Image: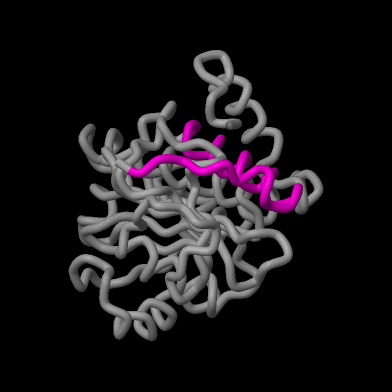
Amino acid sequence: MATAINVQSSCSEEEWQARQRLAACYRIFAYLGWDEMIFNHITLKVPGEDEAFLINPYGLHFSEVTASTLVKIDIEGNTLDGSTFPVNKAGFTQHSLFHRELPEVHAIIHTHTTATMAVGSVEGGLQPVNFYAAAVVPRLAYHKFEGVTVHADEGPRFLASLGNKRMMMLENHGPVVMGRTLEQAFLDHWVLQRACEIQMQTMAMGKPIMIGEEVIRKHVESLSETAIDPAMMGVPEFDAMVRLVDQQDKSWRE
């Protein structure tokens, strides 16, 4: 097994803060049960370095990720920080595409949670049957399953499916959630996850009550009007989860 290197002394303060924030995010996902053994990925651009991003080391569980064990790579897949940890090819292929082609996207999340995979594996996908879904449905794109995402030639089709949206359900697979900040992406994933969990329960009970398009439009507008500073979107929620994680283990900061 590879070992972590001492990166704090060799990276900028901005990069170290980004490493700690991303490591905390991995621990939050593990805390919430959104981990998938050693698979799945959350990436974050390195501040001030447009072609470099941080990704989890392949082989560590989300609950083991720390600021130092995160791997810094460029969009070509080259390791930039001397890490001896490998990187999951599926994570690199997909995330490097979006980081390269969508400069405003700084954080990308891909998971295999039961709820999101289940909803992405039925005809119609996410339906407007609950409070959370009404906020997500207009923002959610879909992409047909082509197998494990390790083939570069799927890139143009990914981008065509995504369009101008920044949340996409890979059918029969799982979601990709993108954000201008890590905290925004986290909150969007949380909302999508809740929408899918509730849909699963609702559909098991009987015929759902569908929310109409006009109500959805009003709902989305009202949510945007009551939102805090857009630059702070997801920050209070993320910080609350960091405090919960810290009650169990603070080693992610190392």
Q: Is residue 168 left or right of residue 234?
A: left
Instruction: Name which quarter of the figure residue 86 lies in.
Output: bottom left
Instruction: Name which quarter of the figure residue 209 lies in.
Output: top left
Nearest the eye: 72 or 161: 72
Q: Position of residue 109 (x, y in %)?
A: 46, 53
* Residue 101 vertical position relative to residue 121 in the rendered view, above or below: below
Q: Is residue 9 magenta?
A: yes
Q: Is residue 181 magenta?
A: no
- The residue under the point 32% across, 58% down is 88
Q: Position of residue 130 (x, y in %)?
A: 44, 42
Q: Position of residue 96 (x, y in %)?
A: 46, 71
Q: Position of residue 242 (x, y in %)?
A: 60, 27
Nearest the eye: 42 or 52: 52
Nearest the eye: 85 or 239: 85
- The residue under the point 38% across, 77% down is 158
The quarter of the picture where the N terminus appears is top left
Q: Which residues are magenta?
A: 2-28
- The residue under the point 44% across, 66% down is 95
